[in-house]
Amino acid sequence: QVQLVESGGGLVQTGGSLRLSCAASGSIFSINTMGWYRQAPGKQRELVAIVTSGGTTNYADSVKGRFTISRDNAKNTVYLQMNSLKPEDTAVYYCNIVPYTATAYWGQGTQVTVSS
């Protein structure tokens, strides 16, 4: 059984920063990609950023230059540093972990609210 525990969400003013963390525990080995998605009310879930096992990163155009994704393989943890936050970044953020030999796992979601 695999568990993903997210933390770091909250309420912040426009221009502020937050750091999200997602730690995977349980029977999980050799993680391929780790990433973050978000879903705003009334909208579909969208990719925010992903990082491969080799360290290659990919970002949504809307967050490039403001968000940074990183991972700690020893801890099976992925981070999302979010700077210069905007009201349109308000959403529930979900971490996603894809092992090499299993289906993807999703976190429970953490709310990020940016006030104007």
Image (cartoon, grey):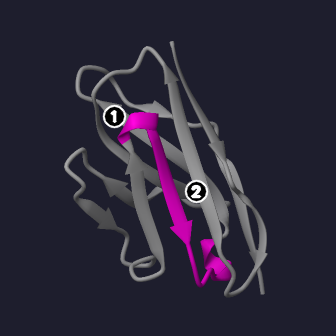
- Nearest the eye: 6 or 93: 6
Q: Position of residue 27 (x, y in %)?
A: 43, 14
Q: Residue at x 44, y 79 (%)?
A: 62
Cα–Cα gap, marks 2 and 1: 19 Å
Instruction: Please indicate whether residue 61 sits to the left or right of residue 114 in the image.
Output: left
**Farthest-out residue, front:** 74
Q: Quadrant of residue 84?
A: bottom right
Judging depth in this view, the residue of 116 and 76 nearest the camera is 76
Give residue 11's quadrant in the image. Answer: bottom right
Residue under the image location 34 percent in, 24 percent down = 103
Q: Amino acid at mark 1?
A: Val
Whichever of labels 2 and 1 marks the residue nearer the N terminus, that label is 2
Write the residue at 39% across / 36% down.
74
> On screen, 76 above or below 39?
above
Give me the residue at 55% from left, 43% from top. 22
Q: Circle 2 sits in a helix, a strand or a loop, which is it?
A: strand
**Can you tell which mark lies on residue 98?**
1
Mark 2 Cα within 10 Å, few/some/many (few <14, many 20+)? some
Residue 44 appears anywhere in the view: no
Magenta part of the chain: 73-89
Mark 2 lies on residue: 39
Q: Nearer the viewer, mark 2 or mark 1?
A: 1
Residue 82 position within the rendered picture, expressed as x and y whole percent measured from the top left:
56, 71
Are there few (<14), some (14-19), or many (20+) residues within 10 Å of tag 1?
A: some
Magenta segment includes 81: yes
72 vs 88, left or right, is left
